[in-house]
Amino acid sequence: MKKLFLLTLFAIMLIPSLCLAYVDSGEQNYTNLKLKYPIVYLNDQDVQNKINTDIATYVYKLKGRYDAGNFYQGSMKYSLKFEDENYISLTITSYWYNAGAAHGMYETVGLVYDKHTGNKIPVSYFVPIQSAEQLENIGIRGHVTKLYNQGMKQIPLRNGWDVDRVSEDYYLGGNGTIYLIYQPYELASFADGNTYIEFTPQAIEYFKRMQH
């Protein structure tokens, strides 16, 4: 009985871990390029391979630019933003520096995958946004959404800055929130870095109602 109890307890303890992915770091180092990227491990190997194959395209893209001499020095890093039994949300930041430039430049992509299919989920699945104008005037300037800088400090959308596109890059923030990712210089100065438009569950619900 004691052995059966211990085996049952061990099985129960395993259930949460089996639902979650294991994310390890892959690394490649060259003379002036350091790549660190996520490798996702799941129970379903087909889904796992599908996700990792998609992630690899971003690694190959930066490596290809390096090989072609498009920049002098570069790097890549990633962050696991959120995970539950259905989704895994990651960001990958590619950095490059051109010789003689005042500073380097970087780009952050947001990757949200369905852990059951391996499909990358578009932002429209979570929140319908009709246009950049709607996002700017009703969202940010209408105080339905909030704008944050790289340090997650709320900032205004200053005069002279406009939302020119609905970003397809985003990440899940937990508790029903999502964050649209914008690159440096898009919505604020370079000093603010990447900027993020926060959608709370209340903001998402409002944008959905405006669809009707």
Image (cartoon, rainbow, N blue to C red):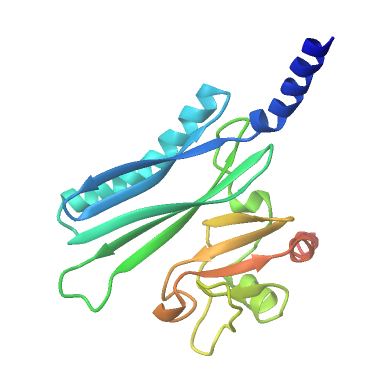
- Indicate the quadrant where residue 118 lies: top right
Q: Where is residue 120? Give x, y as percent.
A: 54, 41
- Indicate the quadrant where residue 98 lies: bottom left
Q: Nearer the viewer, residue 209 or 99?
A: 99
Q: Nearer the viewer, residue 96 or 121?
A: 96
Q: Nearer the viewer, residue 78 or 167?
A: 78
Residue 71, can we see it?
Answer: no
Q: Where is residue 75? Give x, y as percent.
A: 30, 56
Q: Where is residue 70? Give x, y as percent.
A: 19, 58
Q: Is residue 93 left or right of residue 212?
A: left
Q: Residue furthest bottom?
A: 159
Residue 178, can we see it?
Answer: yes
Q: Tell me what residue is drawn at x 33 percent, y 45 percent.
A: 59
Q: Nearer the viewer, residue 18 or 7?
A: 7
Q: Is residue 107 left or right of residue 63?
A: right
Q: Tell me what residue is drawn at x 65 percent, y 32 percent.
A: 17
